[in-house]
Image (cartoon, helix red, strand yellow):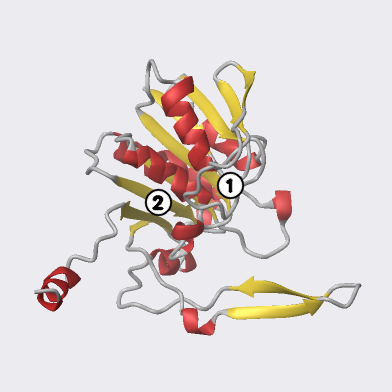
């Protein structure tokens, strides 16, 4: 099995090293094509107004001066065009990608690009307990649990244009309660926090804070699963059509 690895934290990120170790438990045919620099929050963006450069760093290891989506496209259409990957793994991201995070996340968007190309794709993210941890974020939960979470997926059929979003809780491996299949959650956007501060020259600047999660019966969302101490496994699909609205809209337009 040929596996492509990518991420949005950059080719030198600790989480990518963790992901490579995980991938090699399944295959020796592992390739890396990842952004040269951190691209967190890049979403599903493409680089269209400047050239994208590709650099070979070693055997089956490349970096791209662009976004995670650029990296996957470069891998599929150029680097690996004669033998495309059988699986794409994106991550392990430093920080969770839960709820509406998936619309901003470069990690998830790289897996989306793989899904669009018809390749089974999985995004993996490691949550952490407090802000300001930087490179000290522990990946122990993802290292210990990733193989158990991924192995059943590798043998399962994949619906067209779908991907799997996996998040690991900020816990020691022996404190993780198990694996929970979830739906995508939603935070209370009405309670978004914007923190205003002043720089040394007297100008305002702002930090965005996340609102609290919306509680659901049975704690069925990815947000709640992580808060409850479980690994969250969430299937996502790329068809954004809201099917229940179609009949009403057809009526409106005759």
Q: At 91% across and 72% down in the image, what residue appears?
A: 200
Q: Are marks 1 and 2 in contact (CB under 8 Å)?
A: no
Locate residue 118 relative to residue 168 in the image: left or right: left
Furthest residue in direction right, as rendered: 200
Q: At 66% across and 65% down in the image, what residue appears?
A: 130
Q: Residue 37 sits in which quadrant?
A: top right
**Which of the two discs, 1 and 2, sits closer to the camera?**
2
Q: Secondary structure at mark 1?
A: helix
Name the one closer to the observer, 29 or 245: 245
Q: Residues within 10 Å of mark 1 (few under 14, many from 20)?
A: some
Q: Residue 204 sits in which quadrant?
A: bottom right
Locate residue 119 relative to residue 62 in the image: left or right: left
Locate residue 202 relative to residue 85 in the image: left or right: right
Q: Is residue 23 visible?
A: no
Disc 1 versus disc 2: distance between alpha carbons? 18 Å
Q: Residues within 10 Å of mark 2 (few under 14, many from 20)?
A: many
Furthest residue in direction front, as rendered: 254
Q: Secondary structure at mark 2?
A: strand
Give percent across and percent down for residue 209: 61, 74
Give percent across and percent down for residue 176: 48, 57
Total numbered labels: 2
Image vertical order of residue 88 relative to residue 185, above or below: above
Q: Quadrant of the N terminus?
A: top left
Q: Is residue 184 visible?
A: yes
Image vertical order of residue 82 relative to residue 126, above or below: above
Q: At 29% across and 52% down in the image, what residue appears?
A: 237
Give percent across and percent down for residue 190: 49, 84
Q: Which residue is mark 1?
A: 140
Of the numbered discs in the image, which one, if any, rests on residue 165?
A: 2
């Amino acid at each position: 099995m040929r596996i492509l690895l990518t991420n949005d934290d950059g080719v030198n990120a600790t989480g990518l090293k963790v992901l490579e170790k995980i991938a090699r438990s399944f295959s020796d045919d592992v390739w890396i094509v990842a952004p040269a620099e951190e691209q967190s929050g890049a979403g599903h963006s493409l680089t269209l107004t400047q050239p994208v450069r590709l650099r070979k760093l070693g055997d089956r290891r490349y970096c791209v001066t662009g976004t995670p989506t650029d990296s996957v496209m470069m891998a599929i259409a150029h680097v690996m065009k004669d033998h495309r990957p059988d699986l794409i793994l994106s991550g392990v991201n430093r920080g969770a990608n839960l709820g509406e995070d998936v619309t901003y996340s470069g990690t998830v968007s790289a897996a989306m690009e793989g899904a669009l190309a018809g390749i089974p794709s999985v995004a993996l993210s490691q949550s952490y307990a407090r802000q300001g941890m930087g490179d000290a974020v522990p990946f122990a939960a993802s290292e210990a649990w990733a193989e158990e979470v991924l192995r059943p997926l590798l043998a399962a059929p994949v619906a067209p244009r779908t991907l799997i979003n996996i998040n690991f809780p900020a816990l020691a491996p022996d404190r993780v309660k198990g694996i929970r299949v979830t739906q995508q959650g939603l935070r209370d956007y009405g309670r978004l926090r914007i923190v205003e501060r002043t720089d040394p020259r007297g100008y305002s600047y702002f930090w965005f804070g996340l609102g609290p999660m919306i509680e659901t019966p049975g704690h069925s969302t990815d947000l709640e699963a992580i808060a409850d101490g479980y690994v969250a496994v969430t299937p996502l699909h790329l068809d954004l059509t809201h099917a229940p609205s179609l009949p009403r809209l057809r009526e409106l337009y005759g």
